[in-house]
């Protein structure tokens, strides 16, 4: 069977998060205006940034599905990784750095937090929606990860869009909890600096998430090898083919979500005719594509070496 994570799973999880963040951003903005809370304002910027991020992810998914042409003979799959990297940069700058700046400004010029009822209602409402989206992301990850551990999948997955959305939603839930604590502390103590500290913490959370996402996506954008299951499948499939002595070397590149380029050099028996060699290669290719349909481009180079004396 092919690797479950590399198949096309659609954009449902992105659209769901986009709709949730649009609603949340509007209500957060209203609550920030009423209360004057810096933490709520930081959360408002965060949600609007998330909306932009999800739009960029949709652009990336759409571009990655374009068919190969003469200018891009192996397709546009890496476009998804490029836009995922842009999302991480946007989360770092607009979400993280701006929240830290707002928090520092509020700390130096603290203002009292008032009418927190609205803010509390919005925070609890947002936690429910963001929590629902995060749980949906977790379910989708569990569906795709196969036999891998949860964190093993996150650190090694090629599905950048899902990981970016999961990172955003997880940061949003954590940020809302921080905003809740900061808001209550500022209200009951009458010290607006607690609210400012909450804004700074929210910004730092977003920066850490952005750095993690950028690091993961950068590796894919540069050119990362395919999942180890695919590489193992190439070797094990070759071992079942009569006439193939061994796989001399194998190079794979993840070209995009669900798209792998594989170049394989095989050592064949020296007594094979051209027709027999072609038949073996065709059989090898057929079985490999059946086992791993995510291998979109497959190049097999036959080589013939003299049998070693101990063989």
Image (cartoon, grey):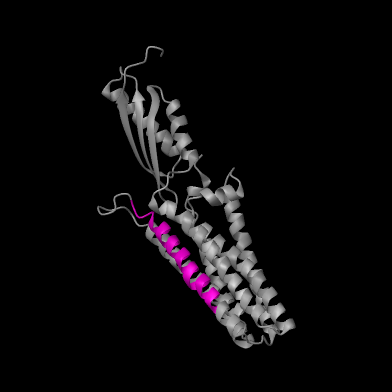
Toward the right, the furthest residue is: 188
Image coordinates of residue 129 in percent, x first then y, are 63, 69
Q: Quadrant of the C terminus?
A: top left
Residue pictured at 63% horizontal, 74% vertical? 198
Residue 134, given in percent of the width and then of the height, sits at 61, 62
Task: Give the image location of residue 155, x and y in percent.
Answer: 54, 50
On the rendered structure, is 269 left or right of 224?
left
Q: Is residue 97 above or below residue 13?
A: below
Q: How many marks?
A: 0
Residue 301 drawn above or below residue 182: above
- Can you give x and y, in whole percent of width and height, for residue 24 in the image? 59, 75
Q: Is residue 27 visible?
A: no
Q: Which residues are magenta?
A: 75-102
Q: Is residue 160 visible?
A: yes
Residue at x-position 37% and y-position 12%:
309
Q: Main secondary structure of the magenta part?
A: helix
Q: Nearer the viewer, residue 14 or 151?
A: 151
Q: Residue shown at 27%/24% (left/top)? A: 274
Image vertical order of residue 31 relative to residue 150, above or below: below
Extreme residue toward the left, this view? 70
Q: Tell me if residue 141 is in the magenta stretch.
A: no
Question: Which is nearer the eye, 195 or 228?
Answer: 195
Q: Is residue 220 left or right of residue 199?
A: left
Quarter assignment of residue 66: bottom left
Residue pushed farthest front?
108
Judging depth in this view, the residue of 17 and 309 nearest the camera is 309
Magenta span has 87?
yes
Q: Quadrant of residue 71?
A: bottom left
């Amino acid at each position: 069977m092919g690797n479950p994570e590399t198949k096309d799973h659609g954009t449902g999880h992105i659209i769901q998060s986009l709709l949730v963040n649009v609603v949340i951003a509007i209500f957060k903005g209203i609550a920030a205006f009423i209360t004057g809370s810096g933490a709520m304002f930081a959360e408002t910027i965060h949600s609007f940034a998330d909306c932009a991020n999800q739009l960029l992810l949709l652009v990336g998914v759409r571009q990655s599905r374009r068919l190969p042409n003469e200018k891009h003979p192996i397709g546009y799959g890496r476009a998804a990784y490029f836009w995922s990297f842009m999302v991480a940069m946007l989360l770092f700058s607009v979400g993280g750095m701006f929240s830290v700046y707002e928090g520092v400004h509020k700390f130096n010029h603290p203002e009292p937090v008032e009418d927190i009822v609205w803010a509390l209602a919005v925070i609890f409402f947002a936690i429910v929606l963001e929590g629902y989206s995060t749980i949906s992301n977790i379910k989708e990850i569990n569906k795709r990860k196969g036999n891998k551990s949860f964190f093993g999948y996150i650190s090694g997955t090629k599905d950048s869009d899902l990981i970016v959305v999961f990172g955003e939603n997880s940061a949003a839930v954590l940020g809302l909890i921080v905003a809740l604590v900061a808001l209550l502390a500022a209200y009951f103590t009458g010290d607006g600096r607690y609210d400012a500290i909450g804004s700074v913490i929210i910004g730092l959370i977003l920066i850490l998430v952005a750095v993690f996402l950028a690091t993961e996506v950068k590796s894919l954008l540069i050119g990362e090898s395919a999942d180890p299951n695919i590489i193992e499948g190439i070797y094990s499939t070759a071992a079942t083919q009569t006439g193939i002595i061994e796989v001399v070397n194998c190079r794979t590149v993840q070209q995009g979500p669900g798209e792998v380029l594989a170049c394989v050099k095989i050592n064949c028996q020296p007594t094979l005719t051209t027709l027999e060699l072609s038949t073996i290669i065709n059989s090898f290719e057929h079985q490999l594509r059946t086992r791993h349909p995510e291998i979109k481009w497959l190049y097999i180079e036959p080589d013939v070496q003299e049998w070693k004396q101990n063989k």
